[in-house]
Image (cartoon, grey):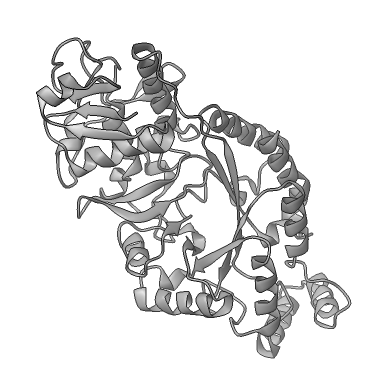
């Protein structure tokens, strides 16, 4: 059964956000009408979304945002609402006290990232600039929470309707910016590394390098067998993203023609899905990204569908437009490096909406809420409590919990001690 929405004007923004909340989160198909007679005659689920109610139907008063075009200053007043917060308060006749559809669109479209802001040193939108961070709801998937508030009023109005049941899901994302710490680097890079260690008095590193290069010890970053085993044991399906760009000041990748490297990443693809980790310089250079896509497809003999950007760099809308031009279908970059939480306010994958062109695009966005670097210098016991709280919230709304870790996170380097146990704790909490 479809939900019929009456509105005075059906816009691309309105279609986009209603389909995310109703179809992707709640599992209800939705259709729209601006014809009063059609709305009145409809016998199933229905609501009106406009300025004034028609009669005594389920009515949600609309904010102007979904009926505008372009980007401008929007007056935001963040207020408490039950267990969370919301904005765009509406009148007392409205069934819900806030226009959750306009508020959701503001977050999902990343409206605030189109407004002027001071970027960080990598050209990224800082979390401190976001309203979610400023008003302390970044660690809640508020769009999904609001959707379940909407579901409650629908259930109250239409008690005989059986809602589909969506399952909670965990998606581990494994980032591979450099597959090996010392191995497969080549003579020039190895000599340069030794010289750097000597001048830095890192004699322990020199010893470890020799042990690895001469085959007496496994490379510290080569944690792939461990990663395969722990995910297979738990019947989880991680996605591995490999950097295939050229060596630059930003990306210290292994040569994409290296036989050992190619053999290693092909063995991962025998078990799990793989994607491209777009290099730092390729993110805004579509020709360079096209070359990296070509390398990926030559190695794996499959079309490239999934991308994740180096350094989680994301400049809207150019980066996403480049992915669309190359017919890449999914991106896993949406999230913050310095703060855990839900950058787009949701724990459900959604389509990228291009505010300049006012259209929903084919690119599917998978937003992560946890990155290993969020907790690198924190007490892991306290960090686990923070992550568990987010897992619990995502479970309540049957969403997707996505976390990003790196192959080097599970090395025996001092800065990552304890992470193997910590990561297994997170996985086990998610599947319990």
Q: Residue at x 36, y 78 (%)?
A: 287
Task: Decide if residue 90 is in sight here.
Answer: yes
Indicate the quadrant containing the N terminus: top left, top right, bottom left or bottom right.
top left
> In the shown orientation, is residue 180 left or right of residue 4?
right
| Residue furthest right in the image | 216
Residue 158: x percent and y percent?
A: 35, 15
Residue 32: x percent and y percent?
A: 21, 33
The image quadrant that residue 200 belongs to is bottom right
Task: Decide if residue 61 is in sight here.
Answer: no
Q: Residue at x 76, y 73 (%)?
A: 201
- Relative height, residue 148 to residue 260 (above, below): above
Residue 318: x percent and y percent?
A: 31, 62
Which of 204/367 is in front? 367
Indicate the quadrant containing the C terminus: top left, top right, bottom left or bottom right.
top right
Q: Residue at x 17, y 20 (%)?
A: 41
Which of 60/334 is in front? 60
Q: Residue at x 24, y 22 (%)?
A: 47
- Relative height, residue 238 to residue 280 (above, below): above
Which of 297/393 is in front? 297
> In the shown orientation, is residue 117 left or right of residue 399?
left
- Relative height, residue 300 to residue 17 (above, below): below
The image quadrant that residue 394 belongs to is top right
> In the shown orientation, is residue 372 left or right of residue 69?
right
Residue 120: x percent and y percent?
A: 41, 55
């Amino acid at each position: 059964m479809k939900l019929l929405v009456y509105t005075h004007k059906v816009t691309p923004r309105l279609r986009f956000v209603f389909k995310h909340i109703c179809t992707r989160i709640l599992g209800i198909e939705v259709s729209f009408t601006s014809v009063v007679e059609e709305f009145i005659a409809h016998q199933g689920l229905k609501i009106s979304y406009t300025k004034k109610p028609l009669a005594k139907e389920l009515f949600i008063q609309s904010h102007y945002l979904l009926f505008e075009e372009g980007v401008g200053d929007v007056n935001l007043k963040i207020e408490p609402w039950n267990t969370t917060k919301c904005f765009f308060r509406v009148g007392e006749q409205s069934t819900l006290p806030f226009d959750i559809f306009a508020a959701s669109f503001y977050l999902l479209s990343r409206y605030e990232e189109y407004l002027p802001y001071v970027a960080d040193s990598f050209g990224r939108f800082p979390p401190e600039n976001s309203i979610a961070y400023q008003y302390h709801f970044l660690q809640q998937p508020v769009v999904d929470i609001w959707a379940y508030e909407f579901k409650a009023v629908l259930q109250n109005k239409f008690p005989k309707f059986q809602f589909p049941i969506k399952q909670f899901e965990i998606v581990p994302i494994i980032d591979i910016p450099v597959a090996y710490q010392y191995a497969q680097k080549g003579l020039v890079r190895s000599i340069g590394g030794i010289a750097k260690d000597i001048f830095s008095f890192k004699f322990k590193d020199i010893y470890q390098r020799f042990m690895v290069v001469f085959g007496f010890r496994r490379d510290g970053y080569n944690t792939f067998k461990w990663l395969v085993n722990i995910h297979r044991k738990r019947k989880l399906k991680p996605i591995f993203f490999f950097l295939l760009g050229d060596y630059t000041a930003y990306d210290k990748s292994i040569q994409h023609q290296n036989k050992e490297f190619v053999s290693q990443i092909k063995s991962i693809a025998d078990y799990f899905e793989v994607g491209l980790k777009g290099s730092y310089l390729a993110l805004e250079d579509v020709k360079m990204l096209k070359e990296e896509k070509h390398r990926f497809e030559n190695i794996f003999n499959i079309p490239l569908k999934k991308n994740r950007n180096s350094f989680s760099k994301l400049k809207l809308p150019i980066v996403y437009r480049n992915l669309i031009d190359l017919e890449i279908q999914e991106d896993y970059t949406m999230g913050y490096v310095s703060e855990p939480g839900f950058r787009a306010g949701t724990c459900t994958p959604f389509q990228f909406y291009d505010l300049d062109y006012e259209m929903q695009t084919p690119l599917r966005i998978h937003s992560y809420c946890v990155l290993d670097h969020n907790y690198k210098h924190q007490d892991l016991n306290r960090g686990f409590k923070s992550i568990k709280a987010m897992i619990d919230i995502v479970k309540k709304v049957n969403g997707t919990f996505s976390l990003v870790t790196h192959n080097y996170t599970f090395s025996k380097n001092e800065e990552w001690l304890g992470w193997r146990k910590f990561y297994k704790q997170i996985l086990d909490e998610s599947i319990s």
